[in-house]
Image (spheres, grey):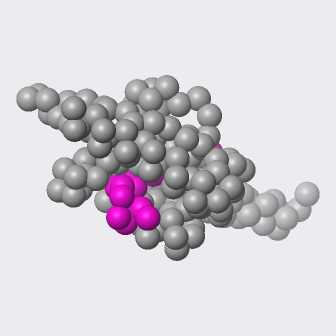
Amino acid sequence: MTLKSRMLSAFIFVLAIAASFSVQAQNATSKAEYKAENEGWLVDLDEAYRLSQETGKPIMANFTGSDWCGWCKRLTASVFSKNDFKTWADENVILLELDFPKRKQLPAEIRQQNAQLQRAFNVRGYPTVWVFDLSKDAEGKYAIAALGKTGYSKTVSEFTDACDRMIAQRETNSGE
């Protein structure tokens, strides 16, 4: 190997490392910069709680593997991306995306939050969608009142009908 080819190889190696750091820097966004894969969804439980308290709406949490889960992508395509769903959601729930990607890095705070909620709801597969209410105790710790869960649905109406039944259960329980 000539000196010129060794220098070229070393230069290419350094470029590859630099590109790798650049991709990692892009993926490791701050909590403030991090956005949900689906437009209109929140990523921060505290923000979802605040809006839920202001509006009286329950939270709908989508546990997803946005960059690797085929069924998650299908649910997004068949339900979450549709205008009928967006209209229904605006009227009925606060949307919270809890992502577990394999190829992108989440901010540490979001990764920790998502893992804690995954354990709290005992989520073992994706997509899993929970509808729930939150309250806070005097120490600021959340208490979850789960209304129900669902997974993949082929249509918006199938999905929203299931969620409407969960929300109706909430209204029945609060009237007791």
| Camera-side residue of 109 and 154 | 154
User: Which residue is located at x 64 percent, y 59 percent?
Assistant: 155
Residue 40: quarter of image: bottom left
In the rendered image, residue 113, in percent from the top left (x then y), is placed at: 37, 38
In the rendered image, residue 68, in percent from the top left (x then y), is placed at: 68, 49
Q: Is residue 32 shown left or right of residue 20?
A: left
Q: Residue furthest bottom?
A: 83
| Camera-side residue of 169 and 81 | 169
Judge whether residue 14 can be spotted in this image.
Answer: no
149 within the magenta span = no
Residue 22: quarter of image: bottom right
- The quadrant the C terminus occupies is top left
Q: Is residue 86 above or below residue 42?
A: below
Q: Is residue 60 shown left or right of residue 171?
A: right
- Please report the bounds of the magenta region as a residue range: 88-105
Q: Is residue 113 above or below residue 156?
A: above
- The quadrant the N terminus occupies is bottom right
User: Which residue is located at x 46 percent, y 59 percent?
Assistant: 36
In the rendered image, residue 75, in percent from the top left (x then y), is placed at: 63, 55
103 within the magenta span = yes
In the rendered image, residue 92, in percent from the top left (x then y), is placed at: 36, 58
| Camera-side residue of 21 and 69 | 69
Q: Is residue 4 above or below residue 152?
A: below
